[in-house]
């Protein structure tokens, strides 16, 4: 009798890492464990020194990532009750662009004694938005020179991406930049720690690293940005690009000791948390848009053709699945916005009421909001508390709530913020379709798919049904699917997705009466969106500049 085979998917999020043990034959998840990052998101002060960070900074400590391998993986295997010898592969996914400076052997600069107190030596998390000036210059120069790759990124390069963050290091701390021998996504760095080999995956290289048609931006272009930046791609990014699902190498003895897994098992090349989720939800066909809804939302979808879509994050050949063009758009803040309001806006009485009811504040506000008819609060909000990723690609924008009165109640503000994120998604979907890229199905994954208020509002605002990924740990399942391919259990990701992925079709249906009202509210959102986001009167930019000057 053949022994059962398993793979492990490890999903590195913003605040924690989750390991899931998955049966290769059918995708059954048999064990899971979570490890919270000890340092979390470093936004205010550097732990090593207490140094205050400037606005829009978001760092992490890479040691937290290794702790996930040391704790969550063995705990997940123990929870599954399987013998580690039954595990044939491991794969990882990461938030992106989450990027760090390292030496040629992979040592993070923040581990060096003389750089432990330097913020630029640490991981720059995806939501580090302090490189907006560099991103603006990268975009402006690309258009001025007629660089062909700029249209692949919706006409704008984000401050979240690799080049903007690296250029910020060069211009703000040339000494740290000089010590940087590799500039590497955490998605690739963690694979390096597992198998001992440096690799670069096609997903992060394409979407976050401006790698298109086999090349990075030219030396001439980079030199015009900054003469010292001319060799950035040739030196700090130089490495062959690996296809998704490919084997990066075998698990090293050191990593085997960390994880309790057999030395030499397959380690798959890295991937991004959103893009790796498509196979888990069986959303790999053209037109199937997957919304990975958590602290932020990523909108990822395959298509047959290459089309320029304004304001998207990128389109990459094979960026999700070989043989198709993978498109990505996104919203920088979604669950983060709801969390911000609960922590900073909901009054003590609301928290006390939730405690008495034995539920979370989110659940209490959601239940109260669901009882109110659509439009009953008289509010409309802009979902830009973390800037706008798509379609304006401007992280100097900020949130707006219009229509507040002395009669406005906490749940009404909460509902307006949920609706704002749904409007942002509708803006993205409409932009795709206006550009000639049809969206035929919407599939939700991530933590927010569990909130009935959120999902019904999204279905109503978009006037479309929503399917739902069955897995509660869909990114980790997606990684486990890629691990199965890397281990040779399936010929490709599509085949593995069919066998191991799971989805519940059309779970949420739009209510016509609600959708009619939301059409009117969306029209108001669009007016605010264009006034505050497209100018010419960019008041939000001026407010941010005043804040930054005050905090300098």
Image (cartoon, rainbow, N blue to C red):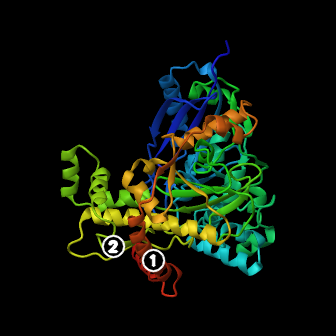
* In the foreground, 152 or 63: 152
Q: Secondary structure at mark 1?
A: helix
The answer to whether one can see residue 482 in this image is no
The answer to whether one can see residue 323 in this image is yes
* In the foreground, 7 or 386: 7
Q: What is the quadrant of residue 432 in the picture?
A: bottom right
For the point 37% across and 59% down, which residue is it?
338
Hey, which residue is sitting farthest top in the picture? Answer: 1
Q: Which mark is residue 379?
A: 2
Q: Whole-percent x and y of residue 222? A: 74, 70
* In the foreground, 519 or 497: 519
User: Quick check: 435 above or below 259?
Assistant: below
**What is the quadrant of the N terminus in the image?**
top right
Q: Are marks 1 and 2 in contact (CB under 8 Å)?
A: no
Instruction: Determine the CA span between mark 1 and mark 2.
Output: 13 Å
* In the displayed structure image, the side of residue 80 where residue 269 appears, left or right: right
* In the displayed structure image, the side of residue 205 where residue 75 appears, left or right: left
User: Quick check: 232 above or below 75?
Assistant: below
Classify mark 2: residues with Cα within 10 Å, few (<14), some (14-19) or many (20+): many
* In the displayed structure image, the side of residue 329 where residue 233 appears, left or right: right
Q: Whole-percent x and y of residue 423? A: 46, 68
**What is the quadrant of the C terminus in the image?**
bottom left
Q: What is the quadrant of residue 154 in the picture?
A: bottom right
**Label 1 sits on residue:** 523
Classify mark 1: residues with Cα within 10 Å, few (<14), some (14-19) or many (20+): few
Q: Whole-percent x and y of residue 393? A: 57, 70
């Amino acid at each position: 009798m053949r022994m059962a085979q398993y793979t492990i998917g490890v999903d590195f999020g913003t605040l924690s890492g989750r390991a899931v043990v998955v049966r290769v034959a059918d995708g059954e998840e048999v064990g899971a464990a979570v490890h919270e990052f000890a340092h979390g998101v470093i936004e205010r002060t550097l732990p090593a020194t207490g140094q205050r960070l400037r606005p829009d900074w978001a760092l992490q400590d890479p040691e937290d990532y290794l702790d996930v391998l040391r704790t969550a993986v063995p705990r997940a295997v123990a929870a599954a009750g399987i013998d580690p010898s039954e595990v044939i592969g491991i794969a990882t996914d990461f938030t992106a662009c989450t990027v760090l400076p390292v030496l040629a052997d992979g040592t993070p600069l923040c581990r060096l004694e003389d750089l432990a107190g330097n913020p630029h030596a640490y991981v720059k998390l995806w939501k580090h938005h302090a490189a907006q000036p560099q991103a603006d210059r990268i975009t402006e120069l690309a258009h001025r020179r007629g660089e062909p790759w700029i249209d692949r990124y919706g006409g704008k390069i984000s401050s979240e991406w690799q080049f903007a963050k690296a250029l910020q290091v060069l211009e703000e701390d040339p000494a740290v930049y000089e010590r940087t021998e590799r500039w590497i996504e955490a998605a690739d760095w963690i694979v390096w720690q597992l198998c001992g080999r440096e690799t670069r995956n096609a997903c992060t290289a394409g979407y976050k690293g401006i790698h298109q048609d086999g090349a990075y931006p030219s030396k001439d272009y980079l030199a015009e940005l900054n003469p010292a930046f001319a060799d950035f791609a040739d030196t700090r990014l130089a490495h062959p690009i690996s296809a998704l699902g490919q084997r990066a190498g075998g698990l090293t003895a050191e990593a085997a000791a960390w994880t309790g897994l057999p030395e030499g098992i397959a380690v798959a090349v890295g991937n991004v948390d959103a893009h790796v989720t498509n196979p888990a939800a069986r959303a790999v066909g053209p037109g199937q848009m997957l919304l990975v809804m958590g602290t932020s939302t990523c909108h990822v979808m395959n298509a047959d053709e290459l089309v320029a879509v304004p304001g998207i994050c990128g389109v990459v050949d094979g960026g999700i699945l070989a043989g198709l063009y993978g498109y990505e758009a996104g919203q920088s803040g979604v669950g983060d916005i709801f969390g911000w309001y609960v922590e900073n806006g909901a009054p003590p009485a609301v928290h006390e009421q939730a405690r008495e009811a034995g539920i979370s504040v989110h659940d209490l506000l959601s239940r109260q909001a669901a009882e109110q008819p659509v439009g009953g609060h008289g509010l409309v909000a802009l979902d830009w508390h973390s800037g706008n990723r798509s379609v304006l690609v401007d992280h100097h924008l900020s949130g707006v709530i219009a229509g507040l009165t002395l009669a406005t109640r906490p749940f009404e503000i909460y509902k307006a913020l949920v609706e704002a994120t749904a409007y942002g998604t509708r803006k993205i979907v409409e932009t795709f379709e206006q550009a000639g890229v049809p969206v035929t199905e919407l599939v939700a994954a991530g933590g927010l798919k569990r909130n009935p208020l959120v999902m019904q509002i999204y279905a109503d605002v978009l006037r479309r049904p929503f399917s739902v990924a069955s897995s509660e740990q869909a990114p980790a399942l997606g990684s486990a699917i890629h691990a199965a391919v890397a281990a040779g259990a399936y010929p490709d990701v599509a085949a593995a997705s069919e066998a191991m992925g799971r989805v519940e079709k059309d779970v949420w249906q739009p209510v016509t009466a609600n959708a009619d009202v939301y059409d009117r509210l969306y029209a108001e959102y669009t007016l605010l969106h264009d006034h505050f986001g497209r100018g010419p009167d960019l008041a939000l930019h001026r407010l941010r500049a005043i804040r930054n000057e005050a905090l300098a």
